[in-house]
Image (cartoon, grey):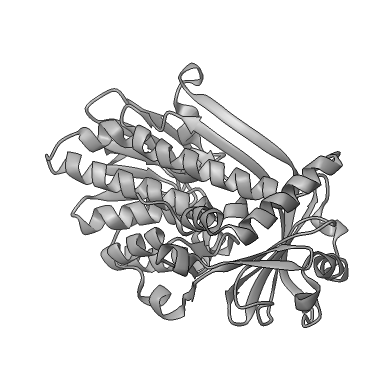
Amino acid sequence: MTTIRTQVAIIGGGPSGLLLSQLLNRAGIDTVVLERATRDHVLQRIRAGVLESGTVELLREAGVAARLDVEGIAHDGFLLSDDDHLIRIDIHALTGRQVTVYGQTEVTRDLYEAQEAQGTTILHEVSDVVIGDLDQDRSVVDFTHQGLRKRLDCAYVAGCDGFHGVSRRTIPEDRRHAFERVYPFGWLGILAQMPPIADELVYANSQHGFALASMRNDNLVRCYVQVPQADRVEDWSDDRFWAEFLRRIPSQLARTLAPHPSVEKSIAPLRSFVSEPLRWGNLFLVGDSAHIVPPTGAKGLNLAASDVFYLHQALIAALQGRGMAGIDDYSERALARIWKAMRFSWQMTTMLHRFEGEDAFAARMRRATLDHLAQSETARRDLAENYVGLPY
């Protein structure tokens, strides 16, 4: 068996694993990244595109924000609607900060290029990963790559391998605690090459269900409609999607929309999920391996970035001989922010979606919540502070 020695083994070559590796490498910490898919597959994943201000600053610290600073679209606010009633949340006026629209695929591409420039070892199409010796001074990660069994000998292991990865399952079942809520609907999303429907994102509540008008750039939009959990992509032609989308967004926006063919279409289920703890010996969970949020609050990638923020500082301090406080506190610090983001994402989801079998009271509560936001600056500020990102 071939053995590779490194300081930090990172399982998962998505944006959280690559960002952690990039930050560690810049501090002189050696890493090896293992990814089960090909690079092309990783770069084809369609994901979120709204970055909190803290995430943007972390990408700048990592030295991967040059293209983001040129091509990213800074937004000072976003729109909520209740049928034809539009409510603008001016996040810049309320918080002094902005969010930036820049696709997760582009973040990943920038990180790959930076990692390659630094010569980081990234192994793709890795399988049969087994993590061991987590209670020892040195841990091991065994895996198969190019038909050969190999081993990483490392000080620490970062599990950035997503909800279905091996990292979380490595923690003994009787020592981890899962908290989950599965929502009875999904989001049908399409990409289309066309101008954005509005200058800012539109989160639409209507009697027909939820819709979201988002964008990736000045000529690429990402739009969604709430659909039953059992629906399939094949059930939805482009014509059916746009007809449903148009009746859910405010009429003043619908009148100006000229639908275009989709270039990608998919359905994402919605769930809230947290697994505790985030540390088991020398293993640390990061991003989707530890938590999943519904996309309503735009927190998925941003929450992974905050995990990376806490963990990279902790690992650098430990490996440079400056103490173990960050290692010992990682799970508690990260979870404190995770649960606040969970609350916000749950709040946005319940405020904007129709639930099957709900009574008239639920619809009135949604309307009352949106009315309160329209009339109360305090309520808008609370929403804006959470949307733009709570401090690390």
Q: How many marks?
A: 0
Residue 212 vertical position relative to residue 354 in the rendered view, above or below:
below
Tell me what residue is drawn at x 71 percent, y 52 percent. Answer: 352
Q: Position of residue 163 (x, y in %)?
A: 55, 40
Q: Position of residue 312 (x, y in %)?
A: 28, 47
Tell me what residue is drawn at x 18 percent, y 43 percent. Answer: 317
Residue 113 vertical position relative to residue 391 in the rendered view, above or below:
below
Residue 378 vertical position relative to residue 84 in the rendered view, above or below:
above
Q: Position of residue 75 (x, y in %)?
A: 50, 72
Residue 125 vertical position relative to residue 80 in the rendered view, above or below:
above
Residue 31 relative to residue 372: left or right:
left
- Which quadrant, please, contains the N terminus? top left
Answer yes or no: is residue 6 visible: no
Q: Nearer the viewer, residue 148 or 138?
A: 138
Tell me what residue is drawn at x 85 percent, y 61 percent. Answer: 236
Answer yes or no: is residue 132 visible: yes
The residue lying furthest to the front in this view is 375
The quarter holding residue 55 reads bottom left
Q: Position of residue 220 (x, y in %)?
A: 63, 77
Q: Nearer the viewer, residue 148 or 9?
A: 9
Tell me what residue is drawn at x 29 percent, y 33 percent. Answer: 329
Residue 179 relative to residue 99: left or right:
right
The residue lying furthest to the top in this view is 174
Q: Nearer the viewer, residue 335 or 156?
A: 335
Residue 110 relative to residue 265: left or right:
left
The quarter holding residue 343 reads top right
